[in-house]
Image: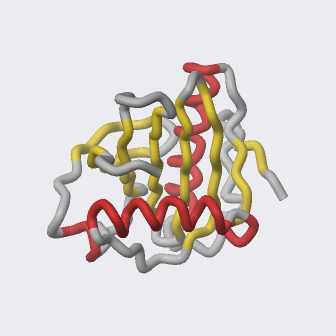
């Protein structure tokens, strides 16, 4: 069942099992605000169990591009296409959020972004491979993020 994320009244619906549920909800709301302000689009998520194709897509890119496997269970996923770009998000129980930005046209931007919820440790599978920059968010507190460019075709 789909859930439209509200960034004015932040809720932990669907994220309750996360030890950093409040911060992860803020991170998810931050994404919702971005899409609403930039593209006038609602940001909807579905339980990961109902979106195994999206989770598999993100995991395939991580495995093939960087030989990464995320140990935390996925809680929710989302996908939308805006202005020729497919955005796929997966939110994990640990507080990790991964987004794949994939421009459908040849030669466009394609990248994987990682965002860490306030209060969570850097996952072991990412700790030695990426440096995280910090940014402040009214909704999510301190967000630590990093990314890598996708080289293959997906």
Extreme bottom residue here?
A: 71
Q: Is residue 86 above or below residue 120?
A: above
Residue 112 in sight: yes
Q: Is residue 14 left or right of residue 96?
A: right
Q: Front-most of 145 and 121? A: 145
Q: Front-most of 110 and 128? A: 110
Residue 145 in sight: no
Q: Front-most of 20 and 145? A: 145
| Residue drawn at 55 percent across, 20 percent down | 38
| Residue drawn at 47 percent across, 45 percent down | 140
Q: Locate residue 103, reporting x and y percent.
A: 46, 33
Q: Is residue 11 left or right of residue 129?
A: right
Q: How many marks?
A: 0
**Quarter of the figure that contains the N terminus:** bottom right
| Residue drawn at 32 percent across, 47 percent down | 150
Q: Is residue 117 left or right of residue 18?
A: left
| Residue 65 picture quarter | bottom left
Model colouring: secondary structure
| Residue drawn at 71 percent across, 39 percent down | 6
Q: Locate residue 59, reporting x and y percent.
A: 46, 67
Extreme right residue here?
A: 1
Q: Locate residue 60, reporting x and y percent.
A: 45, 66
| Residue 15 picture quarter | bottom right
| Residue 48 picture quarter | bottom right
Q: Is residue 135 above or below residue 124?
A: above
Q: Locate residue 144, reporting x and y percent.
A: 31, 50
Q: Is residue 107 above or below residue 26?
A: above
């Amino acid at each position: 069942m789909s859930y439209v994320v509200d960034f004015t009244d932040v809720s932990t619906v669907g994220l309750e099992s996360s030890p950093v549920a409040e911060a992860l909800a803020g991170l998810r709301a931050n994404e919702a605000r971005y899409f609403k302000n930039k593209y006038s689009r609602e940001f909807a998520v579905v339980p990961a169990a109902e979106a195994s194709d999206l989770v598999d897509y993100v995991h395939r890119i991580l495995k093939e591009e960087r030989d990464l496997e995320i140990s935390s269970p996925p809680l929710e996923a989302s996908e939308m296409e805006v202005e020729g770009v497919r955005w796929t998000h997966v939110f994990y129980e640990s507080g990790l959020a991964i987004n794949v930005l994939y421009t459908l046209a040849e030669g466009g931007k394609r990248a994987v972004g990682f965002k860490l919820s306030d209060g969570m440790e850097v996952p072991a599978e990412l700790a030695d491979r990426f440096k995280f920059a910090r940014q402040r968010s009214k909704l999510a507190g301190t967000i630590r993020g990093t990314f890598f460019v996708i080289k293959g075709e997906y």
